Amino acid sequence: MEVEGYYEIISTIEIAKELYDMGRQDLIQSCFSDEIFYDYYYENMLEVIGSVFTHSYNNYDDEYDCEVYIFMDEVISDYYNMAYEYGKKHKLPHDSNPYVTAAGNAVRHWLSYCYSLDWSLLGYTKKKSTARQSKLIVRFGICDCCGFDRLAYGLLQVYKWFANECAKFKNTIEIQNKEKEMMIAA
Amino acid sequence: MISVSLKHLAEAVRGADSFDLPDMNTGTKYIFDNIYNRLVLGETVKLSEINFGNFEYGDLAAMSELHENVFEPSETAVRNITTNLRRIPPALNPVVYI
């Protein structure tokens, strides 16, 4: 059965479904054209890519002929702040901090599917408002293998990972604080 | 020269097994009925009309497998048969002069 632009259409619905499962129906409405049409694929995917994280900046690098995206979000900043506290408490250097390693592994898992896609995770841990914020930088050239839907999906998974890990971190810290309080009370 | 008896062809088509939809779970069936089949029929499908709670993410991959392994090959086979039949020149009726 012929469906023109089948791949683009099914990819669009997949990303919309993922957003629905994440509870982000607001992004379905804001990032997608309501009518499902294969010609809207690139526009829809670029909107999603730019909307996954709270702050997103992009530029075109003429020298390397690639798009550069910089993503920043509270979930990334909070994660690195908590990882830093953990490292300080256990006297671990940055490279030996298991939480820093885990973040790199997670991003590698979701964003290393194409030879023309590169990424960097910059974790800053100072809490001053003027301090640099932790960020994810993604560079990708336009090629057949670097499907925008795969990039959008990968970024959604990275966001989910950081959000889940932050929630776990906060839970662990709360439990430790309660235990401390109980010990002090005893 | 290939000759085809239309009578025999029609009988063969009538007697052929009907195309049954492959088994699908409820989620994939929802996608088939509300999205895929409508797109095949040339209808406009809107995201706002889709109830994303009616299927799982994996059902979309199942639908794609059916599209690639069942529906598209079937359509290609039918298209090939139709094209071949169209290429067969009509038999010329003998002209009888009285």
Image (spheres, coloured by chain):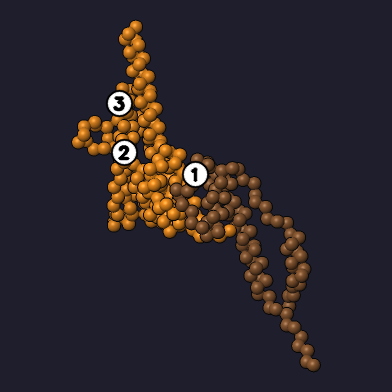
Chain colours: A orange, B brown
Task: Say which mark, if any, is on residue A142.
Answer: none
Element type where label 1 sits in the image: loop
Task: Say which mark, if any, is on residue B51.
Answer: 1
The residue under the point 32% across, 8% down is: A185
Q: Residue A42 in the image: x percent, y percent?
A: 40, 55
Task: Please give left or right for residue A139 compared with residue B87 in the image.
Answer: left
The three-letter amino acid code for the residue at tag 3 is Glu
Give the class, few, some or many, for how many residues have Cα within 10 Å of label 1's Cα (few <14, many ≥20): few
Which quadrant would residue B16 be assigned to in this image?
bottom right
Residue beneath label 3, please?
A85
Residue nearest the observer in this picture, A40 or B35: B35
The three-letter amino acid code for the residue at tag 2 is Asp
Give the class, few, some or many, for how many residues have Cα within 10 Å of label 2's Cα (few <14, many ≥20): some
Q: Residue A40 in the image: x percent, y percent?
A: 41, 56
Choose mark 3 or mark 1, whichever is in front: 1
The residue under the point 73% across, 78% down is: B1
Residue beneath label 2, please?
A73
The residue under the point 53% across, 51% down is: B35
The three-letter amino acid code for the residue at tag 1 is Asn
